[in-house]
Image (cartoon, helix red, strand yellow):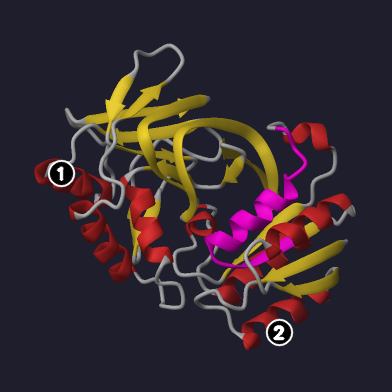
Amino acid sequence: MRAILVVNPQATSTTAGGRDVLAHALASQVKLDVVETDYRGHAMAVARSAARDGIDLVVAHGGDGTVNEVVNGLLADADSDPAELGHVPALGVVPGGSANVFARALGISADSFEATHQLLNALENDRSRRVGLGLADGHWFTFNSGLGWDADVVGRVAKRRGKQTTAGLYMRAAVRSYFRPPLGRPALTIRIPGHEPAEALTAFVSNTDPWSYLGERAVHLNPGCSFETGLGLFALNGLGLPTVFKHVRQALATKSNQRGRRLVRHDDLPMIRIDAAEPVNFQVDGDLVGQRTRVEFFSVPNALTVIT
């Protein structure tokens, strides 16, 4: 088996020692090349080349941003249907970031050494699973995407790159973005086939649940959402403090089925379209993509093989 290990040395918890242990362990089972990323988009370029060269496995060692780049590289030549590509390398993940939402949702340990052991065991026993992905405006996403408040938060945190992205940093960014939204609060119109249009001020689209983590606590918006279902939608048409506090409390509950008169929520959707009255921030897997006035979200079942 030919494999490439893609390492983001700037990720929160990656270290040279951890990289060497991982590379040495993998090299005992596969023919391995190691690439350290040194610019934005580098991981995507490496994964795209790996797919075109017929590599069997690409392992991402970094945070959710690194994983997202690798996934987008692996599927760069797919036109919304990975089945048309033929061979696509399998994906392996060894967490090295601060949140590692995708890895945790797959049951991969947040500890890089334990995750390495899991990966080696899965390779030895030929264990993998197919996962569905989301596709939004040409960007593949593994766990979530969104327009509005959450994307504002992501943008604010991105400006602090170089500072460890802790739960506290996200909380402060959320509070500041709530009281001082950088682009205001343009109205969003949500269109789902078979449903009447609905208005909202912020919208989250999930590909799995939990949607994120606050430290060690999982954040649940669409508990019925998984890698084997369609997309989950969670949108609010009001952002008054009572509404926000209510849904934050529900999201942090161990078992919660979100409800509320300001809530627009659906599970297992094949497609969602969201139009904005004015440009709003748009994020994919916790990475700010830019500003949009329209985004179409699609669920793509069985898009990728993950070693786990």
Q: Position of residue 191 (x, y in %)?
A: 41, 21
Q: Which residues are magenta?
A: 58-79
Q: In the shown orientation, is residue 281 left or right of residue 62?
A: left
Report the front residue among 249 and 201.
201
Amino acid type, mark 1:
Lys
Amino acid type, mark 2:
Asp
Which of the numbered marks, if any, corresponds to residue 246? 1
Residue 307: tell me if it is visible.
Answer: no
Instruction: Please say if 95 is above or below 104.
Output: below
Residue 140, image quadrant: top right
Report the front residue among 209 and 284.
284
Q: Position of residue 297 (x, y in %)?
A: 52, 32
The N terminus: image quadrant:
bottom right
Residue 254: tell me if it is visible.
Answer: yes
Q: In the shown orientation, is residue 245 left or right of residue 118?
A: left
Cα distance, mark 2 to mark 1? 46 Å
Sooner in the amino-acid sequence: mark 2 or mark 1: 2
Residue at point 75% right, 78% down?
23
**What is the secondary structure assignment of the residue under circle 1?**
helix
Report the front residue among 249 and 153.
153
Which of the numbered marks, if any, corresponds to residue 20? 2
The C terminus: image quadrant:
bottom right
Residue at point 40% right, 72% down?
160
**What is the secondary structure assignment of the residue under circle 2?**
helix
Mark 1 nearby-residue class (10 Å; few <14, some 14–19, many ≥20)? few
